[in-house]
Amino acid sequence: MDPAKKGVIMVAEPSGGQSLAERLNALFAMVRWVDRHGRQREYSTAEVAEAVTKDPSHPATLSRSYLAMLRNGSHTNPTLIVLEGLAKFFDEHRGPGTPSITIRTLVMGEDPEDELLREQLASRQVRMIAMRAGVMTPAMREQLLKMMDMFDPAD
């Protein structure tokens, strides 16, 4: 099945590892697709390399073997064009409502959750709730989370 037509979900947070290989592998683990049986699957190195190369919106070409070398750390300095292609692939295949994946995510290890957190904390009400939760006991916070789960429209 064509990876672009697969349903995708984000299952974990990126590790924010120190090396490009660690950050890249965290994205492979984080961005997944769902097969026709409802099982979560990780994109293969070959699938990502092929999708990046076939994307007409940028000039990046990427072989499976070169991407494997980036993932295992034996190559550590890809071109900006390759980084653009990888960031675009992972950003386009991330789950709905999840933070953007950018070149900065790959190069600097910036956690995409940081931007989402900044956006959400811009709301005065969100900050007030967070400040009040910060003084609660762990048991009280757990109870509050359970109550909030009851109102979560995503469930």
Image (cartoon, helix red, strand yellow):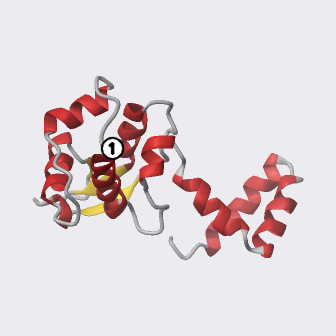
In the rendered image, the quadrant that contains the N terminus is bottom left
Is the residue marked by circle 1 packed among few (<14), some (14-19), or many (20+) residues within 10 Å? some
Q: Residue most toward the left? A: 1
Residue 93 point in image, percent of width and height: 31, 61
> Relative to 76, is 53 on the left or the right?
left
Residue 58 point in image, percent of width and height: 23, 61
Q: Nearer the viewer, residue 27 or 84?
A: 84
Residue 40 point in image, percent of width and height: 29, 51
Mark 1: secondary structure: helix
Amino acid type of the residue that numbered disc 1 sits on in the rendered structure: Phe
Residue at 27 percent across and 56 percent down: it is: 33
Q: Nearer the viewer, residue 50 or 3?
A: 50
**Compared with residue 76, is residue 128 higher up or lower down, i.e. above or below?**
below
**Compared with residue 141, is residue 64 higher up or lower down, i.e. above or below?**
above
Residue at 13 percent across and 50 percent down: it is: 50
Residue 70 point in image, percent of width and height: 29, 32
Residue at 35 percent across and 53 percent down: it is: 87
Residue denoted by label 1: 28
Residue at 17 percent across and 55 percent down: it is: 51
In which image quadrant can residue 46 be found?
top left
In which image quadrant can residue 123 be found?
bottom right
> Relative to 22, is 90 on the left or the right?
left
